[in-house]
Each structure stands twice: as structure tokens, then as C-alpha cells.
Image (spheres, rainbow, N blue to C red):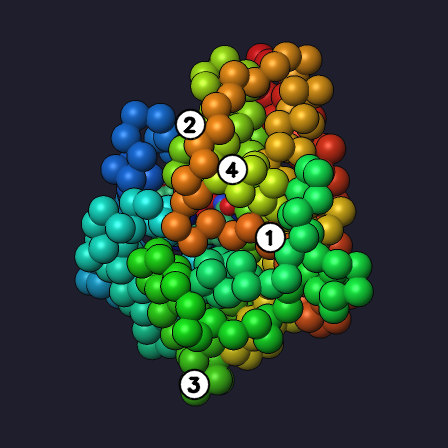
């Protein structure tokens, strides 16, 4: 069936993608240099995930840095004719970190993506190219929506067109503050679209909100539910930051994201861009999420409220997945919000 290249293979989305493409029968080349350990020292090494993947029959790990053009070209040159799909999930994933080291952030997120696109174009232009983008490409634009403060969450009025299904891809990405992370991802997102539109390659951009799952190694700066779950489990104090803790995210399990990638691979299109998330049924505010975890773990979270909100923090994000579901009607998320929370509780209660 050919080879699937999965960058960021030892990360949350990468590892689920490896497992699902492996189950389809593809050989998997996972590229991951464990740079997450450098981004978030101490708490989030990917060694355990890598070991699990290496037990799969047709998995090979490469410690390549996606910015290493020579290493990428050498790999793609040898195996290009067999590469059927590239799932690009390696990234620097945090706003706060990007502001600390903009050059490194841009080199990984933007330049690394361009190098992969170019290697694909040169050596396997027929391969599907799947890119993990982010809703942060819309910058602070979602915060301009006419939100209403309900008791436990911010929300739109029911008559608003985005109320039932969320925010579609038509939302402008211009004239809004993105954070440096949002810009490095937007640069990559546009380049992936362009390789589809300009060169006719089979590229799909997936703009996610919160991707989650019990294998997520959450950090303060990244991985909302995973970090919250670990605080409830360990008794570590959790800071609820800004917006009265009523900011809303929709959550999607990484396995459901990987299933969307498989659907795209099986029937690829050119230059597509999709919002992907859990939709309204898997949405929760921070304080609603705390309630869910306290109930699942049967214990209280030690929490503190910090009034100053994070720059660029979305007050309300729910993804409209209508475009993807129109193109791939058999796909629908399988994990409910409750099953996501229960999976964390089971994993972390030991
Ligand atoms: N998790 C989320 O909530 C979320 C939301 C929206 C978008 N995304 C996007 O999805 C993708 C995957 O996210 P994730 O949560 O799995 O992140 P993750 O940090 O768990 O995984 C990313 C992996 O990439 C590896 N990596 C980083 N830089 C690398 C480099 N230069 N060369 C090789 N490997 C490198 C890291 O070691 C890590 O294992 C990212 O593009 C992220 O921006 C994630």
C-alpha cells in the first residue's frame, strides 16, 4: 500500500495518525526529534510514545529535524516512489513559547512545512499532503463575535448564524492579532493551500481548535484538557486565566482527527482547507470542564482565578465542520466529551 510519512509521530496527533495509517496496511516512517522536550522541558518527553510505536510491525522511526533539508531530501529521494501520504503534525504548538523564541518558532512551523512540501513535490507529487493547522490562523477575530455572558459560559445568541454549527472557514484571517505562533502556522497553512492550488498537489489543511486524548502530555502553555486533568489528578494548583473561566472551546479526540486524515487520504482533493473540531456537542467552558473532571475523578480541583486574560485567548470557539462532512459524509467524531473526560480519568487514576 505504500509509505505514510508522519512528522511529529511521537506527539499526540502524530501517534494516533501512525496507528490508523498502520492499521490500513501502510508502512510508516515516523519523523520526530523529540523537540517537544526542548519546548517544554521536564514534563513532556515523547520517549514512551516512541517506544509504543516502535513495537508496531511496519513502523520505522527517524530522528530527523523537519528543518534538516538534506536529511529530508535523502529520505524522500530513496523512498519517494512509494510515499502515498505525508501527515505533517510536527510543530512548535504554543503562543507563549513563540513569543520567547520567534526565529525557532517560525523555522519549525513555517520553514519546516515548506521544506516538506518541496520534498513531496519533487519526489512524490501524487502523495496526499495533510497539514495540521490551527484555529489560531483566525487570530483574535472570533473575539469580535457578539457574545453573551451566560452563567457558566460565553455564547452566541441562538439566532446568530454561527450558534448551531460554529465558525466556518470563511472567517477572515486578515487585520487581526494572531500571536507569532498564529502567524507561523498561517504562513504554513497558506503555503500548503498554495501547493494544492498552484501545483495541483493533493493538499488538505485541517484547522483544529483543541485536540485531545489521554495520551496528550499537557503543559501549562498547551493542551487544555490534558493539563487540567493532570492538575485534578495530582492536586497541583490550576490557574483559571481570564474571561471569568467562561471561555468556550470545542474538543476533539486525536483518534477522530486521525480518522478524518484517513478519509482525506482515501479520497484526496487539492488545496482544501477545513475547520475540524468537536462541534457544539463537545464544547465546554473552562469552568464546565472543571466540573466534568471533578465529577469523573471524584475530587476537587485546587484552583485560583487570574483576572488578566492571555493575549489572543479565544473567548468562544466552536468549529463548523460542515465543509469537511459535506466532502466526507461518512466521517463523524466517535468520542463524546464525556468519553474524552472518562478516558483521562481512567488513565490518570492509575
Ligand atoms: N493539540 C492541540 O490542541 C492542537 C490544536 C490545534 C492544532 N494543533 C496542531 O496539530 C499538530 C500536532 O499537535 P500535537 O498536539 O500532536 O503536538 P505535540 O507537541 O504533541 O506533537 C508534536 C511533535 O512534533 C515533534 N517536533 C517538533 N518540532 C520538530 C522538528 N523540528 N522536527 C521533528 N519533530 C518535531 C515534537 O517532538 C512532538 O513530538 C501541530 O501542528 C499543532 O499546531 C494541535
Nearest to N terminus: mark 4 or mark 2: 2
Q: Position of residue 110 (x, y in %)?
A: 31, 64
| SS label for mark 4 | helix
Q: Secondary structure at mark 1?
A: strand
N-terminal of the two: label 1 or label 4? 4
Q: In the structure shown, which secondary structural element does the residue marked by tag 3 occupy?
A: loop
- On the image, the x and y values in percent for residue 341 come to 66, 30
Q: Which residue is mark 4?
A: 224
Gap between marks 3 and 4, in whole Å? 37 Å
Identify the residue position indicated by label 2 in the image.
48
From mark 1 to mark 3, how far is it between C-alphas?
Answer: 36 Å
Foreground: disc 1 or disc 3: 1
- What number is the disc on residue 107? none
Residue at image position (55%, 25%) is: 229
Query: Which element carries disc 2, helix, strand or loop?
Result: helix
Instruction: Determine which of the numbered discs, if any, sits on residue 199 in the image.
Output: 3
Choose the circle earlier in sequence order: 2 or 1: 2
The residue carrying pointer 3 sits among few (fewer than 14), some (14 to 19) or many (20 or more) residues within 10 Å by Cα, namely: some
The picture places residue 5, in percent across and down from the top left corner, at 43, 56
Q: Nearer the viewer, mark 3 or mark 4?
A: 4
Amino acid at each position: 500500500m505504500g509509505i505514510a510519512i508522519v512528522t511529529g509521530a511521537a506527539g499526540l496527533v502524530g501517534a494516533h495518525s501512525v496507528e490508523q495509517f498502520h492499521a490500513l496496511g501502510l508502512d510508516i516512517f515516523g519523523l520526530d526529534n523529540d523537540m517537544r522536550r526542548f519546548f517544554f522541558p521536564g514534563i513532556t518527553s515523547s520517549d514512551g510514545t516512541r517506544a509504543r510505536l516502535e513495537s508496531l510491525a511496519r513502523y520505522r522511526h527517524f530522528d530527523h529535524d523537519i528543518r534538516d533539508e538534506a536529511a529530508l531530501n535523502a529520505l524522500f529521494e530513496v523512498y519517494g516512489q512509494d510515499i502515498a501520504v505525508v501527515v505533517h503534525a510536527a510543530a512548535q504548538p504554543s503562543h507563549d513559547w513563540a513569543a520567547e523564541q520567534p526565529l525557532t518558532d517560525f523555522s519549525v512551523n513555517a520553514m519546516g512545512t515548506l521544506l516538506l512540501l518541496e520534498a513531496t513535490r519533487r519526489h512524490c507529487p501524487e502523495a496526499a499532503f495533510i497539514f495540521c493547522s490551527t484555529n489560531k490562523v483566525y487570530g483574535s477575530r472570533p473575539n469580535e463575535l457578539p457574545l453573551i455572558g451566560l452563567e457558566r459560559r460565553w455564547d452566541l445568541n441562538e439566532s446568530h448564524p454561527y450558534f448551531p454549527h460554529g465558525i466556518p472557514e470563511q472567517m477572515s484571517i486578515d487585520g487581526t492579532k494572531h500571536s507569532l505562533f498564529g502567524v507561523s502556522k498561517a504562513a504554513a497553512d497558506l503555503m500548503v493551500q498554495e501547493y494544492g492550488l498552484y501545483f495541483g498537489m493533493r493538499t488538505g489543511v485541517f484547522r483544529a481548535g483543541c485536540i485531545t486524548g489521554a495520551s496528550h502530555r499537557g503543559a501549562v502553555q498547551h493542551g487544555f484538557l490534558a493539563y487540567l486533568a493532570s492538575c485534578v489528578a495530582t492536586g497541583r494548583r490550576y490557574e483559571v486565566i481570564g474571561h471569568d473561566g467562561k471561555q468556550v472551546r470545542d474538543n476533539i479526540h486525536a483518534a477522530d482527527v486521525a480518522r478524518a486524515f484517513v478519509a482525506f487520504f482515501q479520497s484526496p482533493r487539492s488545496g482544501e482547507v477545513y475547520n475540524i473540531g468537536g462541534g457544539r456537542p463537545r464544547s465546554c467552558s473552562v469552568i464546565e470542564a472543571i466540573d466534568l473532571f471533578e465529577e469523573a475523578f471524584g475530587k476537587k480541583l485546587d484552583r485560583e482565578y487570574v483576572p488578566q486574560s492571555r493575549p489572543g485567548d479565544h473567548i468562544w470557539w466552536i468549529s463548523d465542520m460542515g465543509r469537511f462532512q459535506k466532502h466526507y459524509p461518512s466521517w463523524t467524531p466517535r468520542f463524546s466529551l464525556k468519553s474524552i473526560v472518562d478516558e483521562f480519568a481512567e488513565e490518570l487514576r492509575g
